Image (cartoon, rainbow, N blue to C red):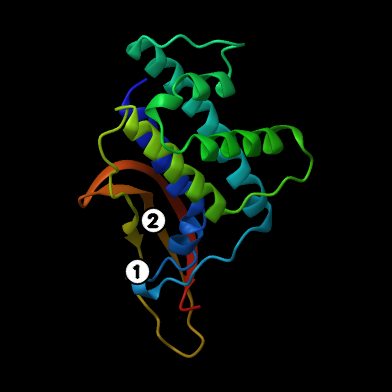
């Protein structure tokens, strides 16, 4: 597995943690500045589901990285060749073995224990520890400074041909708006999701 696999996971965590961004940029189609956007409310369902799911995925990736590292280093993994065994086999290369075992046990909680809870902060701490271990095994070289980013544009605007601005006037206006939410590195997109919304609004409203 390549370093990009781990980087992609980190980007997905950033995107998941900012799941409210599509709401933020779509909640008012006439606003054109990011400082106009109101923050999205927290979704208690996603807050409860996403961190433990990502925690389990992180451990699955870590397990595979350890297997690859053991093969590259010529280290024999005993036991059942599970995550525990791989951590033990590579313990001589790692400085945070006890912490990695604690992460492994938490993974089991999220996978097998009903109502086991995980916060974004706990996930972040675990990612830091796993990243440090991967660096010691020369799997990763650095940690990209990813940033969440969003943009929007009014693709088309089809106003009425003539305006009757008398008392109580109204007009239907057709619009197509495009939105982008994703991740940037050094001000360049590295992952993005785009969609368009066509709508007819009454102007003024």
Closer to the camera in the image, 40 or 158: 40
Residue identifier under label 2: 177
Name the side, left or right, on which 37 lies relative to 49.
Answer: left
Residue under the point 77% across and 37% down: 113
Q: Secondary structure at mark 2?
A: strand
Residue identifier under label 1: 34
Residue under the point 60% across and 11% down: 79
Closer to the camera in the image, 129 or 190: 129
x and y percent of residue 87 in the render?
50, 25
Cα separation between marks 1 and 2: 15 Å
Crowd tier of the residue under label 1, counting other residues whose Cα lies within 10 Å: few below 14, some 14–19, many 20 or above = few
| Mark nearer the viewer, 1 or 2 | 1
Q: Name above or below for residue 93 compared with residue 41.
A: above
Q: Name above or below for residue 169 compared with residue 141.
A: below
Q: Earlier in the sequence, mark 1 or mark 2?
A: 1
Q: Name above or below for residue 171 compared with residue 168.
A: above
x and y percent of residue 24 in the render?
47, 63
Number of numbered discs on residues: 2
Closer to the camera in the image, 198 or 20: 20
Which quadrant of the view contains residue 162?
Answer: bottom left
Q: Secondary structure at mark 1?
A: helix
Which quadrant of the view contains residue 176?
Answer: bottom left
Q: Name above or below for residue 75 compared with residue 199.
A: above
Residue under the point 53% across and 65% down: 40
Query: Which residue occupies the extreme bottom position in the image?
Result: 167
Crowd tier of the residue under label 2, counting other residues whose Cα lies within 10 Å: few below 14, some 14–19, many 20 or above = some
């Amino acid at each position: 597995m390549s370093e990009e696999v781990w980087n992609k996971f980190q980007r997905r965590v950033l995107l998941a943690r900012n799941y409210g961004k599509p709401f933020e940029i779509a909640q008012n189609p006439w606003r054109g500045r990011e400082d106009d956007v109101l923050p999205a409310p927290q979704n208690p369902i996603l807050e409860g589901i996403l961190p433990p799911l990502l925690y389990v995925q992180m451990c699955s990736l870590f397990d595979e990285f350890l297997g690859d590292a053991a093969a590259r280093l010529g280290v024999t993994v005993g036991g059942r060749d599970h995550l525990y065994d791989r951590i033990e086999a590579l313990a001589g290369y790692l400085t945070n073995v006890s912490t990695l075992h604690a992460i492994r046990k938490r993974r089991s909680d999220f996978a097998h224990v009903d109502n086991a809870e995980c916060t974004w902060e706990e996930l972040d701490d675990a990612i830091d520890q796993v990243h440090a271990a991967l660096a010691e095994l020369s799997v990763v070289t650095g940690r990209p400074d990813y940033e969440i980013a969003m943009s929007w544009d009014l693709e088309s605007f089809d106003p009425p041909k003539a305006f009757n601005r008398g008392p109580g006037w109204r007009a239907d206006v057709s619009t197509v708006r495009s939105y982008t939410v994703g991740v940037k590195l050094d001000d360049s997109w590295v992952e993005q999701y785009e969609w368009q919304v066509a709508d007819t609004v009454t102007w003024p409203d």
